[in-house]
Each structure stands twice: as structure tokens, then as C-alpha cells.
Amino acid sequence: MTTIIPNLFIIVAADSKNGIGIKNDLPWHLSDDLKRFKAITTGNTIIMGRNTWFSLPRRPLPNRRNVVLSPDPLNEEGAEEIRSLEAIFDAVDPDTENFIVGGESMYRQFLPHCSKVYLTRVEGEFNTDTFFPELDSQEWKLIEEGETLRDSKSDIPYRYLIYERIV
Ligand SMILES: NC(=O)c1ccc[n+]([C@@H]2O[C@H](COP(=O)([O-])OP(=O)(O)OC[C@H]3O[C@@H](n4cnc5c(N)ncnc54)[C@H](OP(=O)(O)O)[C@@H]3O)[C@@H](O)[C@H]2O)c1
């Protein structure tokens, strides 16, 4: 049976085709979404794959517990290293919210175990080489849908969507 963890969430920004990244970077710069990401994750635990860790311009992200999944030692200051998917289940902090923050391999592996998805739907199609998996409507219910906003710096349109697991 699949273990579903009540305080394990996903946070992701994906374009109209579910693209999330290009050449180990983000396909866009959404300054307002980054601020929201900071507001939601600060004081909590963020869990990421090795590629996403190295994609961060400044790491660790401050005032958060940074957990990084990698089979090999990284020896990077501020990264709490975990070697396997199973080990994450023990590392999830019962007293904070825990966010899978990318990338594709992490979203695919952890989606079955998460209870909520904070999805920023970036409107339009970008050049991407990594993707977020489709959310099955039998499993996920849209509980919040924001209006279309435009990023204050890039003018890119996007919407905030929140999905909750039904089963
Ligand atoms: N749009 C968004 O919201 C968003 C958010 C985050 C990231 N991204 C983008 O996503 C892209 C990166 O995605 P990605 O799939 O290439 O990389 P990733 O998921 O960040 O990292 C993958 C690496 O993590 C390690 N890993 C994953 N699962 C593991 C397991 N079960 N056990 C041990 N190690 C494991 C492996 O490291 P080894 O290689 O050492 O085996 C694997 O190669 C980038 O373009 C990034 O900018 C987008």
C-alpha cells in the first residue's frame, strides 16, 4: 500500500504543457512567484533532488531545513543529505510542513505520497526539458484557483492552483 503523508506537499511552477525546467534552470523568471515560494516554505522543510540543489544560485535557502536526495556525498554546507527515497519518510518532520521542491525526478517519485500540490500554472509554452507529471482527476481535487496575475517584473501571466488528494 502507498504511504500518504499528511504534511508532505509539492510546490511547483509548470507551464501549459507541464514543463518545469531547461538545462537545469527555470525556463522563466517569476519574481512574485519566488516571493510566494519563500513565504510558504520559510520555517519549514524543503526536500529536493541533487540537480535542483545545484541549480540554486544561493544555497542553502535560508531559514529552512534543506534536505537533498543524492546517492553520493555532496559535502555541501547547509544540505542535509539523504541517500534514498525510503530515508525521506523518516526525515519528514512531523512538526513542520514538508515540501518537495523539485525537480522532475522528485515530483514523479513523491507525488504518490503527497497530500497537497501548490501549482503555479505559468500560462504559455516555454522551451523545457523537464516536466511535472499529470494530476489524475480521480486522485486530485482542485480546492483553490486564483485569477490570472502578471509577474511584476517579467509580465508573464500565471495562476495559483491548489490541489488536495482525494484518495
Ligand atoms: N518549475 C519548478 O517549480 C521547478 C522546481 C525545481 C526544479 N525545477 C527544474 O527541474 C530540473 C531538475 O529536475 P531533474 O529531474 O533533472 O533533477 P532533480 O529531481 O532535482 O535531481 C535528480 C537527482 O537527484 C538524485 N535522486 C533523485 N531520486 C533519488 C533517489 N530515489 N535516491 C537517490 N538519489 C536520488 C539523483 O542524483 P544523482 O544524479 O547523483 O544520482 C538524481 O539524478 C531543473 O531544470 C530545475 O530548474 C523546476
Image (tube, rainbow, N blue to C red):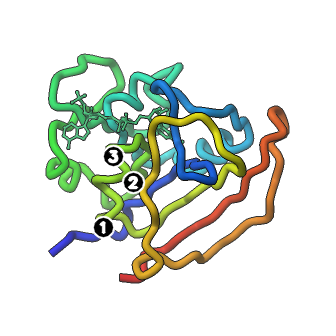
As drawn, 156 above or below 97: above
Location of ligand 1 given as a quarter of the image: top left
The residue lying at 40 percent from left, 46 percent from top is: 45
Horizontally, residue 127 falls left or right of residue 31, namely: left
Reading the chain from its start, which is encountered first: label 3 or label 1? 1
Quadrant of the drawing holding the C terminus: bottom left
Is label 3 in a helix, a strand or a loop? helix
* Mark 1, residue position: 5
Residue 121 screen position, x and y as percent: 64, 55
Q: CA distance from mark 2 to mark 1?
A: 10 Å
* Mark 3, residue position: 106
143 and 96: which one is in front?
Answer: 143
Residue 36 screen position, x and y as percent: 66, 47
Mark 2 near mark 3, Cβ–Cβ under 8 Å? no
As drawn, 148 above or below 130: below
The residue lying at 84 percent from left, 39 percent from top is: 155
